[in-house]
Image (cartoon, grey):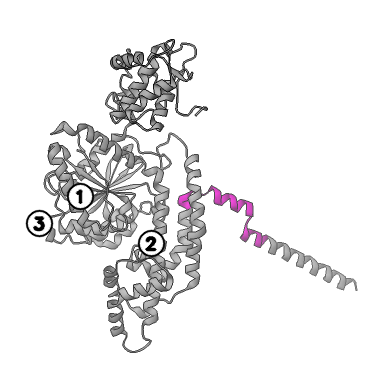
Amino acid sequence: MFDTFLRFKNHRKKEGQKKTKKRSMFSWLGGDSSKKKNKEVLETVSEGLRKIYKQKLLPLEEYHKYHDFHSPALDDPDFDAKPMILLVGQYSTGKTTFIRYLLESDFPGIRIGPEPTTDRFIAVMHGDEEGSIPGNALVVDAKKQFRALSGFGNAFLNRFQCSTLPNQVLESVTIVDTPGILSGEKQRIDRGYDFTGVLEWFAERVDRIILLFDAHKLDISDEFKRCIEALAGNEDKIRIVLNKSDMVDHQQLMRVYGALMWSLGKVFKTPEVSRVYLGSFWDHPLHYDINRRLFQDEQHDLFQDLQALPRNAALRKLNDLIKRARLAKVHAYIIAELRKQMPSMIGKEKKKKELIQNLDKIYEQLQREHNISPGDFPDVNKMREKLQAQDFSKFNPLKPKLLEVVDGMLATDIARLMAQIPKEEASAPAGTNGASDPTVKGGAFSQTTEAETPFGFGRGEGFDKGADEAEWVVNRERTSADSTFESLGPVNGYLSGRAAKEHMVKSKLPNSVLGKVWKLADIDKDGQLDADEFALANYLINLKLEGHEIPSELPKHLIPPSKRGVQDPVYPTLNDNDE
C-alpha cells in the first residue's frame, strides 16, 4: 500500500515537472509580449525592411523564379548602404569632373580628358585610406552591396572597381562613375558585357540618377537612348544637368535648353518635363559670366536636392521595396498563368511559342481578372526574351498563401515602418557624420564657405544686403520714402494703418505679402508707422518686387538705429503670438 502511494506521488511530481518544462518551452518560443513590442519599436527602419523582405517577400520571389527574370535577391548591405548617386552621360560631358568638383579632391583611378577616358564603373566610397579594390574582389565582400554584380561575368568585373578615400562628402553618400556612352561608329563596338543591364541594376538601388549633357553635345545616340530606356521605372530618381553651360552666351543657352528639352521629350515617354539644372561644374573661370547668377541659383537647387538624400534614404528604400513587391505579385500571376495553360504531355514547345507570342493578351486577361494596373506589368518585349530560355512545365502554380503574406506586408508592415521614419529621424544623434546625419557635408557642400565668407549663396543680396556695414542700408534708398511719408499726412510723426495701407497696396503685391511686411516694419507693435518704420516697409516691398524673398525674422542690421534698444532689443518675427 505504501509503495503504491510513493509511486503515485512520484508520478504526480514528474507530471508537474513536465508541465513546468512545457510552459517554459512555449514561453521561450512566444517570448514576453512586452519585450517583443519593445523590440519592434526599437528596430531601425532598415532592420525592419530587411526582416519583412526575407520573411515575407523573398519566399514569393524564389517560388516563382523572380530573380531569373528581373533583379537578383537583395542582400543585407542593400538595406544598410549609404545613399548612392549614379552619373550617366556621353563621353566628355564632365561626369568625372563633376565628382571631383563635389569632393574637391581627386580619387584613385581618376582620368579626365576630351576623349572617352573613364572605361570602367567606379564606385567612389569612403575609406580610412586611399585605395582601389578590383571588381572580382569587390563582389565577394559581404559588407558591400555589390555581390549580385558577379552575375554579369568577368568581362564586366574587369571593368569595375571601388575607389576609397577619406572624404567628408563620402561619409554620407557613395558616388558611382560610369563609362562614357558612345556615339557614332564607336557605339557599334561591343563592350563585352551587358552595359544597359548593369545600369538597370544600379538604377534600382541608387537614390539619385544624374544624366549629364554637354551644351555642345545634345544628340542622344542609340546607345544613350537604350541606357535611358533601361532607367524606366526610376524616373523619380532622375535629375538632368546641362553641364558646361558657360561655354555659350545667354542667347545660345536659351536655344540649347530648348533643343535639349525637345530631344528629351522623344526619349522620356512621360508628359511631364524633367527638371534640368544649368551650370558649369568645375573650378575653372566662366567663359561667359553673364549667367553667373543663374548658375549659382541652379547649383544651389541641385546641391539642396543631393544634400537631402541621407534624410530621405529610408523612405527611398521603402518605396523601392513596395515597387518590388508589386512587381513580384504581378510576376507570380504571369508565371502561374503560363503554367496553367501548358499541356501536360504533347505539344509543349508549340504551346510555349504560342504563349510567348500572345503574352500581351495574357497581360490584358490578368489585368481584368485581378484588377491590376497596366503600369505594374513588366515590359512585354523583355519578358518575351527572358521566357525563351525557360521551361514552362517547371513553373509553379499560384500559391494564394504567399500572395496573402505579401498583401499583409504591404498593408500592415509597410505602414508601421512609414510611421517609424519620422521618429527615427527625430531620435537620430545630431552633429555626427554617419548614416544618421540628415545632410551631406564637406567638399562643395561645405557650410563654412556659406556662412563665413561673402561668397556664400545669397550673401550680400536681398535682405542680407548691408549685413556687414555700419550704416543702416535702408538710409541709402529712403529719400523717396521720406517725401511719400510727408505727403500722406502723418499725425505727430506717425502714419495710421489706413493711410499706410493706401500707399502699400499700390505695389500690387498680395495682401498676404503686405501683411508680412507690416508685421516686420511695425517694430514697436503700436499699429502705426513712424518715418523709419515706413522707410523699412518700402525697402522690404522693393526687395519683394525685385524677386527676393521676405525674411521670416527681421535681421539685426535692418532694424532702424532708433529702435535698437540697448537693454531690451526687439526682433520682430512672422511667428508672434498676435498673428
Tell me which amino acid carries mark 3: Gly
Look at the numbered disc 2 and give the secondary structure of its residue.
loop
493 versus 210 height, above or below: above
Question: Where is mark 1, residue-wise?
Answer: 261
The magenta span reads 24-47
Q: Which residue is drawn at 16% across and 33% down?
A: 286
Of 279 and 183, nearer the camera is 279
Q: Which numbered disc, 1 or 3, marks the residue closer to the eye?
A: 1
Number of residues whose C-alpha sits closer than 10 Å to that of mark 2, classed few (under 14), some (14–19) or many (20 or more):
some
Please tell me in which quadrant of the rendered image residue 450 appears. Answer: top left
Of 73 and 494, nearer the camera is 494
364 versus 194 height, above or below: below
Q: Which of marks 2 and 3 is nearer the N terminus?
A: 2
Question: Where is mark 3, residue-wise?
Answer: 184
Tell me which amino acid carries mark 1: Met
Q: Is residue 578 magenta?
A: no
The image's mark for residue 73 is 2
467 versus 425 height, above or below: above
Q: Position of residue 169 (x, y in %)?
A: 32, 38
Of 350 and 9, nearer the camera is 350
Tell me which amino acid carries mark 2: Ala
Q: Is residue 96 left or right of residue 17?
A: left
